[in-house]
Every structure is written in C-alpha cells, then in structure tokens.
Amino acid sequence: SQKIEQNSEALNIQEGKTATLTCNYTNYSPAYLQWYRQDPGRGPVFLLLIRENEKEKRKERLKVTFDTTLKQSLFHITASQPADSATYLCALGNNDMRFGAGTRLTVKP
Amino acid sequence: GAVVSQHPSWVICKSGTSVKIECRSLDFQATTMFWYRQFPKQSLMLMATSNEGSKATYEQGVEKDKFLINHASLTLSTLTVTSAHPEDSSFYICSARAAAASPETQYFGPGTRLLVL
C-alpha cells in the first residue's frame, strides 16, 4: 500500500538555523510533490511545488529537493524565524493528492 | 489569489443529528472539489472527490450514505454528516480546483471543526 512518511513528528531548532524536513514515500509514483504549511485549527497553505522531472526548487528562504530514485523530498527553511513555527505537510499527487502526517516545527528565539 | 471559504468554521452538535458544511470558491469556478478529514496530529485523509453536476467519488472506507456530498454549482459543494456520532468529531477541510487547471492546483478552505457530543 502507498505510504508517505515525514521523518519526525516534531522538530525543534534555534532561530537562525536551517530546518530540514524529510518526506519519504513508498509504492507510489507521483507526478508532483508539494509542501504546505498548516497552523493550528487552519487549513493548509501552499508553499512550493516540485515536479517529478525537477531536482530542486527555491522560493525566498525555502528550498525543496525531489529525488524520485530515493523516493524522498527534503524541505529546507534557511535563517529560520519563530514565525516559521508551524506544521509542515508534504503532499504527493497525480490526479489527487495524498498527504503525509506532517512535522511540527518549533523555532526557538 | 483564489479563495475558498467554509461555513461554519466550527460546529457542536448532539449525537444523532445531521450537520451540513459548505465549501465555496469565492472568485473562481471550481469544477472539482475535494473533501478531507483530519484527526489530531494526523494527516489530511481524502474522503471524496466531487465534480460539479455528478455524483461524488468516495475513497475506500468512507460511507457515502453517512457523508453526503452535493456539488450542485460551480462555486458550492456541501458535505452533510448524517446521524453524527462522537467518532465523527474531526476537522473537515475542503479544497477546490478550477476548470482547466492542472491537477496540482488546489486551493484549500480554512476548515470546519466538528464536535459531536
């Protein structure tokens, strides 16, 4: 069966450091992968999309990589800030999207 | 940008009653809407996909007679939880995709928290 695993339930880092979140999947060949931010009690907010034929995407302090051989995506937030504290979800898709359980990131001042 | 709203944002109901949740695309026409359910500290689980004017397609394990979905217009889809029970308490989130949009383009609503007593 398809599985989408995000490396850890929670990640704590110090302000200014780079946060790296991992998304691994099995039994799935997605055409694209997305990363979302979700704050408590709110819907997901789209951050970045990367397609199966792309290796890396950047947007401001965010970077995502996509390795279809390893079946893994890495999501990086550089120069992290307390305002980056949230749950980050990866989602894999073809015609619909399947989500990982998320990693709760806490950036401490 | 595209905006999707949900109403109500939260609802408390008694066991056995039915609850209707609305999902609206405010500034675009959504030919396809998706309904997700999210339990605490868990991922969003796709419940069903609805296309305007046709019956919804439910994911395996989701009871279509319990979770009634209507997508009667290009801007509105409704999810009715019939005869709700405490185990139906969850966070329900919809998303919408515009006509001719690529499959990865979904806009999410803010979610509806349902508590069944």
Image: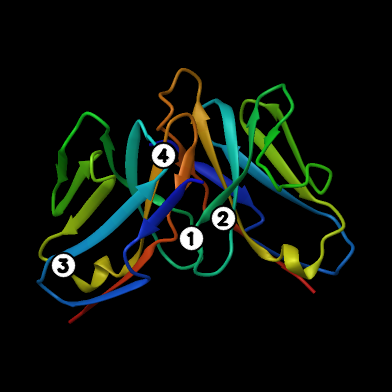
Tell me which label, 3 or 4, sits earlier in the chain. 4
Q: CB of mark 1 within 8 Å of CB of mark 4?
A: no
For the residue pair A108 and B57, the one nearer the viewer reads as: B57
Q: Residues within 10 Å of mark 1 (few under 14, many from 20)?
A: some
Q: Amino acid at mark 4?
A: Tyr
Q: Chain of mark 1?
A: A
Q: Is residue B81 left or right of residue A16?
A: right
Of the residues tagged 2 and 4, which is closer to the observer?
4
Q: Residues within 10 Å of mark 4 (few under 14, many from 20)?
A: some
Judge if badges 2 and 4 mark residues of a common chain.
Answer: no
The span from disc 3 to disc 2 (Cα, nearest Å) is: 27 Å
For disc 4, the marked residue is: A28
Q: Residues within 10 Å of mark 3 (few under 14, many from 20)?
A: many
Query: Residue at the spot x=33%, y=43% of the render?
Result: A34
Residue B111 is marked as 2
Residue A42 is marked as 1
Q: Residues within 10 Å of mark 2 (few under 14, many from 20)?
A: many
Residue A80 is marked as 3
Q: Chain of mark 4?
A: A
The span from disc 1 to disc 3 (Cα, nearest Å) is: 21 Å
Answer with the quarter of the image where residue B89 lies. bottom right
Tell me which label, 1 or 3, sits earlier in the chain. 1
Query: Residue at the spot x=25%, y=69% of the render?
Result: A83
In the rendering, at what x and y percent does residue B51 appear?
A: 64, 26
In the rendering, at what x and y percent does residue A32 appear?
A: 33, 34
Q: Chain of mark 3?
A: A
Q: Amino acid at mark 1?
A: Arg
Q: CB of mark 2 within 8 Å of CB of mark 1?
A: yes
